[in-house]
Image (spheres, rainbow, N blue to C red):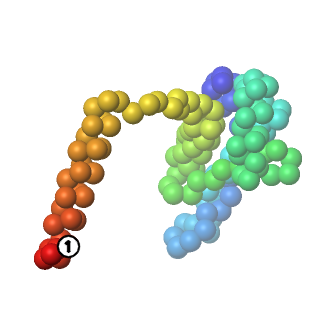
């Protein structure tokens, strides 16, 4: 994944932010929407595109465009930086391969400990029974 190439392919759009804010919010477009077309990206290999299209399918538009928005800050510049950071994190997190789990056998020590604990528990429960008075 070539982050520099990906950053150049992101398109930004500024819109008015929702919520409270008085007069300021009505005249300033501080919310930023970042759009990134996965299928047309030159910063991703074909294999990476395939993985991301599968993993991010619910978040993509019909055209295969990933959209993220940020409106936390009153600064359009800060919201743009947040969008870029989130988009790159999302791509890198979804490209990480999970570690393959290899099945192992229990050790001799763990088998002994298990049997010892089972014996202790069975004795503990046997002592709870009513004594046999025959």
Name the residue located 70 percent from the left edge and 43 percent from the top edge: 55
Q: Position of residue 113 (x, y in %)?
A: 25, 40
Mark 1, residue position: 129
Name the residue located 55 percent from the left edge and 66 percent from the top edge: 24
Above or below 8: residue 11:
below
Q: Quadrant of the N terminus?
A: top right
Q: Position of residue 71 (x, y in %)?
A: 57, 57
Above or below 43: residue 28:
below
Element carrying mark 1: loop
Q: Position of residue 85 (x, y in %)?
A: 55, 39
Name the residue located 18 percent from the left edge and 62 percent from the top edge: 124
Few, some or many C-alpha atoms within 10 Å of disc 1 (few <14, some 14-19, many ≥20)? few
Compared across the picture, whether 77 is left or right of 61 comes to left
Is residue 71 something one can see in this rendering?
yes
Q: Position of residue 130 (x, y in %)?
A: 17, 76
Name the residue located 82 percent from the left edge and 35 percent from the top edge: 39
Give residue 48's quadrant in the image.
Answer: top right
């Amino acid at each position: 994944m070539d982050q520099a190439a990906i950053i150049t392919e992101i398109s930004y759009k500024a819109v008015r932010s929702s919520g409270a804010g008085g007069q300021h919010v009505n005249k300033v477009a501080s919310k930023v929407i970042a759009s990134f077309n996965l299928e047309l990206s030159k910063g991703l290999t074909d294999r990476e595109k395939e993985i991301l299209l599968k993993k991010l399918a619910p978040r993509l538009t019909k055209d295969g465009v990933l959209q993220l928005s940020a409106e936390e800050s009153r600064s359009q510049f800060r919201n743009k930086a947040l969008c870029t950071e989130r988009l790159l994190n999302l791509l890198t997190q979804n490209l990480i391969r999970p570690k393959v789990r290899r099945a192992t056998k229990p050790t001799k020590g763990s088998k002994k400990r298990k049997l010892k604990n089972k014996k202790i528990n069975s004795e503990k429960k046997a002592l709870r029974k009513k004594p046999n008075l025959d």
